[in-house]
Image (spheres, grey):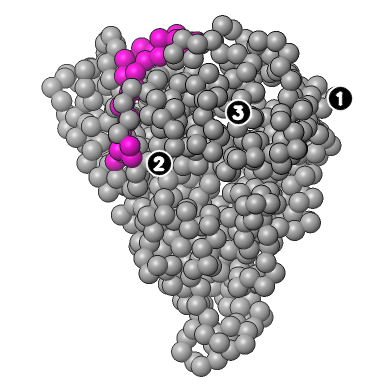
Amino acid sequence: MRKKWLMNVITLAIILLLATACNRNDKEQSNEAEGSNDKPAQTEDNKVDTNLLPTKVTNEGEAIEGGTLHVGLVADSPFKGIFLAELYTDATDSSIMGYASNSLFEIDGDFLITDEGIAKLDVDTDNNKVTITIQEDVKWSDGTPLTAEDLIYPYEIIGHPDYEGVRYDDDFKNIVGAEEYHEGKADKISGIKKIDDKTIEISLKKVSPAIYSGGDGLWGYAAPKHQLKSIAVKDLISSDAVRKNPITLGPFKYDNIVNGESVQLVANENYYKGKPKVDKVVIKVVSTSTIGEALKAGQFDISSFPATQYDTIKNLSNISILGRPDLSYSYLGFKLGKYDKEKGENIYDEKAKMNDVQLRQAIAYAMDIETVSDRFYQGLRVRANSLIPPAFKTYYDGTLEGYQYDPDKAKELLDEAGFKDVDGDGLREDKDGNKFTIRLAAIAGSDTAEAIVEYYRQNWKDVGLDVQLTTGRLIEANSFYDKVEADDPEIDMYLAGWGTGTNPSPAGLYSKGAAFNFSRYVSDDLTKLLNDIDSQEALDPTYRARAFRKWQEYMADKAMVVPTLFSTSTIAVNKRIKSYNIDRETGTEIQDLELIADAPIK
């Protein structure tokens, strides 16, 4: 869904990181950064106070006509190049698609759908129905009118029997007739009806508050049926229509794609909000180790950067740094089962190696996350106490303690669970007295990734746990997620991160039918808690807040997934951008962005 553009495309790239002067006079280079006088405030121990990072910067100077916006896509792996909302799984692909988005809805500062987007959503809670109406004469980038057929087609892709993506889940099954269509028992989804050329109606099994944030099976994107209908669903992912010449609704359209390396987009003259003020956008992959030098050299107008490099770029005179709480968290996950692709559900294994609650809790207590935050992230990440990011103010519970560093508590839990050092070598054996080694998968990312993982391994060794790296080294990001998603038997636990999107409901990540439930933990109690969050009773905000609290407490107690860090989105903005605002409600929309120089300022 559209998020006032806002920099959503940049903040998605940041999840993967969890993975001087030019010849202009001082007046022309001056800028105004709200709340910070252009420099983030520093605490006494030289950590940035993320509450005082500005969300907006304005640079003086006359806007030029057109120009090319240069965007740094920070990643240590090539992007996959799957540019269709129904199929992509990669944050870098999503970042690129943000400039050419097919999203239908806009949301407000509370992450609720408004009436300001391409389409309007009307909810009939009494009859469990929603109506989606295209509000204007909107055209695709090739000039073809957007119609109701384009709103229906994404559901037909996701629900199709040959669909192998991850978006056919428990949420999608809430649509009446979706399961019958997916199982090949029906040739269409009975609950989706075309009312007229601009309107569709969807019947749901239940309507909950999640519908207003894009949940309950609602899909927030259109798909160009006139381009895709002749391509078999199983062939879409490899088609030119997805990888080389996608048709879009967004402010920019694809012009040239160098697979894995760069994308050039040009202004979409058919964009419903008007042609963008810049002519082109060039997005290039840049590694975490070189982004600092690239920003210094003026290679990019906008880029994320690893929090570990904040100290090296904070004083650059050609950029401003903006920040806001991110809709993401890092976590430690434990493998507790398998995903049955044929059934589309997670299968929990009670005999799994890591299926001991006290063992998992001990591993969490042994992690000195606070020191990692201070030493490597300059305070731009803080220890997480919940699987709900603080940006969701209504549902995040700041009173939860989470797993604070307590090695003595970790040792006590391990002793109670029967993991003891039998042979006196300082490392604990399993409950039967056999050698016990835990295999950890982690992403090869920033230049400090290895140091951070080694610090955690030492934490675990300090309480007697032998933790070795899967494959013997950190794993390239794409390969890492391939292995985690495939339930590689060489992975016992893994360090990863999630971007939650604007729908706080956790069902898409932790339900029985969620392909993204990488721990594979399933229980009747968990299912009940997730259903309660998205129940009709939860239309009462107080009821839903209590349901979120119960779920957060349950997840903390079971510790199948342990949150580690909350992030601050930090964005480097070159001073040739006239004005830029990343506030979630009032932020700059990409079509309105202007430049005041022909090239990024060095």
Q: Could you tell me residue 24's position as x and y percent?
A: 16, 19
Residue 132 lies, with reference to residue 297, above or below; the image says above
Residue type at mark 2: give it: Lys
Q: Is residue 247 left or right of residue 430?
A: left
Residue at 28 percent across and 20 percent down: it is 68
Of all residues, the one furthest to the bottom in this rendering is: 423
Circle 1 packing at 10 Å, graded few (<14), some (14-19), many (20+), is few
Residue at 55 percent across and 52 percent down: it is 384
Circle 3 packing at 10 Å, graded few (<14), some (14-19), many (20+), is many
**Residue 28: which quarter of the image?**
top left
Which structural element holds mark 1? loop
Q: Is residue 123 left or right of residue 127?
A: left
Numbered badge on residue 9 = none
Of all residues, the one furthest to the right in this rendering is: 126
Residue type at mark 1: give it: Asp
Q: Report the front residue among 432 and 89.
A: 89
Circle 2 packing at 10 Å, graded few (<14), some (14-19), many (20+), is some
Residue at 71 percent across and 17 percent down: it is 194
Residue type at mark 3: give it: Pro
Residue 163 lies, with reference to residue 67, above or below; the image says below
Which structural element holds mark 2? loop
Numbered badge on residue 126 = 1
Of all residues, the one furthest to the top in this rendering is: 137
Residue 36 included in the magenta stretch of the image: no
Cα gap from disc 2 to disc 1, whole angstroms: 43 Å
Image quarter hosting the N terminus: top right
**Span shown in magenta:** 259-286
Numbered badge on residue 154 = 3
Q: Report the front residue among 211 and 307.
A: 211
Image quarter hosting the C terminus: top left
Numbered badge on residue 80 = 2
Who comes first in sequence, dot 3 or dot 2? Answer: 2
